[in-house]
Amino acid sequence: KAGVTQTPRYLIKTRGQQVTLSCSPISGHRSVSWYQQTPGQGLQFLFEYFSETQRNKGNFPGRFSGRQFSNSRSEMNVSTLELGDSALYLCASSPAGFGAASYNEQFFGPGTRLTVL
Amino acid sequence: GQQLNQSPQSMFIQEGEDVSMNCTSSSIFNTWLWYKQDPGEGPVLLIALYKAGELTSNGRLTAQFGITRKDSFLNISASIPSDVGIYFCAGDRNTGNQFYFGTGTSLTVIP
């Protein structure tokens, strides 16, 4: 079974621009979560999507948004980029069914390294 | 956002030694996960724990779900050079599949 894939792997943008990152979950997984990882703040939860609906949201400004498609693929968008948005953005998928805690185990993709100049 | 307290922050050990690290929280968690991350890659799931007191092994790795449900421990026995990386704990309070991550333990194994 293929793992979680993220595209692109690397991205360089300038301040004020916007960016869209893509995540394809493991086949059959219905939940996709997004995280921002920086040396200073560690792994910070952005949001989680389940069945095309945002189910959980972390403490990030509205410039960070996402969506999920009917095939469970997800995109994350950051508008008006700031220097502090430079980070590794990680996507994780899980089966997210009911009745078994193992359905919440999250499997990560390799990440997209975003550099804002 | 909330983060779990993970210690130690870094470790330098000789090949063959055992390693212990732990994660604590002020909140109760219902699931604990342990991950390993290599440079430039995403975290890889090592062990998952679901019940207080549970002890689970994966090869040379053993993790425990603390009985207070506010902590977890990871032990690596007989370390080898490929154990090098950053280890993260993650906890879920079952509030809807939202995990909180530890600050990470950087492990260096000296051959």
Image (cartoon, grey):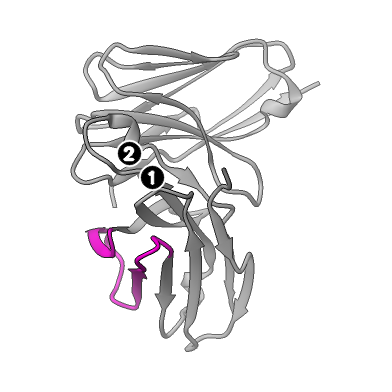
Query: Residue, x 24% and y 13% (percent of image)?
Result: B67
Chain ID of residue with mark 1 = A
Q: Which residue is nearer to you in this view: A17 or B45?
A: B45
For disc 2, the neighbor class at 10 Å (few under 14, some 14 to 19, many from 20) is many
The numbered disc on residue A94 is 1
Amino acid type of the residue tagged 2 in the rendering: Asn
Chain part drawn in magenta:
A51-73
Amino acid type of the residue tagged 1 in the rendering: Ser
Query: Residue, x 47% and y 71% (percent of image)?
Result: A84
Horizontally, is A35 left or right of B51 in the view? right
Residues under numbered marks 1 and 2 in contact, where contact means CB atoms less than 8 Å apart: yes
Horizontally, is B94 left or right of B102 in the view? left
In the picture as drawn, the residue positioned furthest to the bottom comes out as A16
Report x, y in % for residue A53.
Answer: 24, 64
Q: Quadrant of residue A76?
A: bottom left
Q: Which residue is nearer to you in this view: A57 or B109?
A: A57
- Circle 2 is placed at which residue position? A104
